[in-house]
Amino acid sequence: MLRFVVLITIIGLAVSANAYAQGRASAKPVSLKTESEESVFTYQYAATGAGPTWCFGSAAMVRVGDRLFASGQVPVPGVTGINCVRPTLYEKTDKGWQLIYTDPGNTREPSPIVVLSKDKLLMSNNPNDAGPTDYDGAAHPEILAFDPKNPTTPPQKLTPVWDTEIGFHGHSYRCFASDSKNKEFFLSWNIAYDRTYWTFYDRKGKWAKQGELMFPMGTEYPTPEPLRLCYSPVLLKDRAVHFFGTVDIEEPIQEWRDAKFELSKSKWDYVFRRLFYCYTPDVIKKPFSKWIELTNLDKTAGNAYAMDIHRASNGDIYLLWQETSTDYRLREKFFPGVKMTNALKCAVLRKGTIISTIDISKGGEGIISDESPTWGRFHITPKGRLFAVYTASVITPDGKSSTRNRIKEIFSNLTVSKPIDLDLKHIFGSTYFTTSPRSGSTPSDYIELFGNCLDTGNELRYAKIHLQE
């Protein structure tokens, strides 16, 4: 009997090892060639509380065939309230990036964009009727529909339909996702702290379904409260909607809030420590599932941000996020034994159940690693290969520290490749975008990045890197 058990164990290990080897060997090595690095636009600071990349859960850059677009914003002189910018749209041309549209309405937040089809580029807009000195006013959500082949033609305006009366204003934390194959999109809007309002636009050009997604509750806090989810990556595919959000609430622990106030003298103290996910297999016919918590760093006052979502060909859902173990300002007094670490993590879910969670990259105190990740995005190739594009603080062989943009491939057996550095003159720091399928862009053999670089101040830049087998 013992010999039989040992034999079965050996066979099992051999099968597992073979599957592991096949998963590793199934993907050919890749090389990277940087083809361009360009300035898109330089923005001026505006007192909105939301910069031009603040919609990072959605997209500010999309590709429609051989044409590339990016959204931005420009400040409005003489406006003192938070609705003091106007949305802009840029196109990459042979002469560089050109400003092709500036909206006449004032707003607060950046305006995410998606591809609905090869004939429609959509921008989510939130114009506000506040006067020049009003702090805020009533907003009027709309969708601006551009013809990608003639983008300078004035856009068509679509007015979203909701199933209840909503008092829209300057704060929206909206999510915008497209299924360009089916010519459908999903839009959600945070107005209060306890829910997000959503609406769905179908392939027939109808606002086919609306609803309210209630946020999870923080019943364990001294004062129970709704856990508002913001900066949420959302994925729409064949009417299934996947919603992945970062909890954004005021510091719930009074002692920690007081300690931070002594250091900063600021009462503005929102924390981002928990991540939640839910989904519906059919947004028309089925309700959203219960919330699934991906990470909770409340015990050590850590930090976490939802980064991206990918749906594999077998239907598995990949969730990407970055987390930091603790708050360096509080560690000495409250968590002296907690080590400071950074991790880029990925969870894989199958039919709403987490089947695995892996560290794509991890570094910091007590970890043998040359890198410590701070930001990341997915990149998907036409053959379905999945990569994490990320920013990391790297220790070089001579012991010096530098910041790099890197990629790692995520294999089907949930192992990852060794890192490859992107050869860039200007390193992208945080809040950068890729041409994501979640926004209707098609998978590509080119990694395209748009966002802030570490050494270029208020300039938003673009880079294109050829990923070759």
Image (spheres, rainbow, N blue to C red):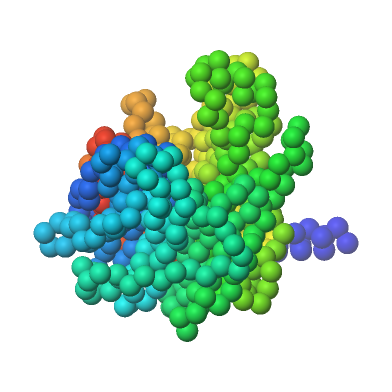
Residue at image point 44% right, 78% down:
183
Q: Is residue 355 visible?
A: no
Quadrant position of the C terminus in the picture: bottom left
Q: Is residue 256 visible?
A: yes
Image position, residue 161 (x, y; %)? 52, 70
Quarter of the view holding residue 29: bottom left
Residue at image point 59% right, 62% down:
165
Quadrant position of the N terminus in the picture: bottom right
**Which of the two residues, 439 or 388, is positioned nearer the viewer here?**
439
Residue at image point 67% right, 21% down:
255
Looking at the rendered structure, the number of numbered marks drawn on it comes to 0
Image position, residue 409 (x, y; %)? 44, 56
**Which of the two residues, 449 or 418, is positioned nearer the viewer here?**
449
**Which of the two residues, 209 or 448, is positioned nearer the viewer here?**
209
**Does residue 384 appear to the left or right of 469 in the view shown?**
right
In the picture as drawn, the residue positioned furthest to the right comes out as 1
In the picture as drawn, the residue positioned furthest to the bottom comes out as 204
Residue at image point 39% right, 31% down:
395
**Does residue 241 appear to the left or right of 125 in the view shown?**
right
**Does residue 22 appear to the left or right of 88 in the view shown?**
right
**Which of the two residues, 301 or 29, is positioned nearer the viewer here?**
301
**Does residue 316 appear to the left or right of 265 in the view shown?**
right
Q: Is residue 220 above or below residue 378?
A: above
Quarter of the view holding residue 15: bottom right
In the picture as drawn, the residue positioned furthest to the left comes out as 95
Image position, residue 117 (x, y; %)? 37, 76
Image position, residue 228 (x, y; %)? 61, 47
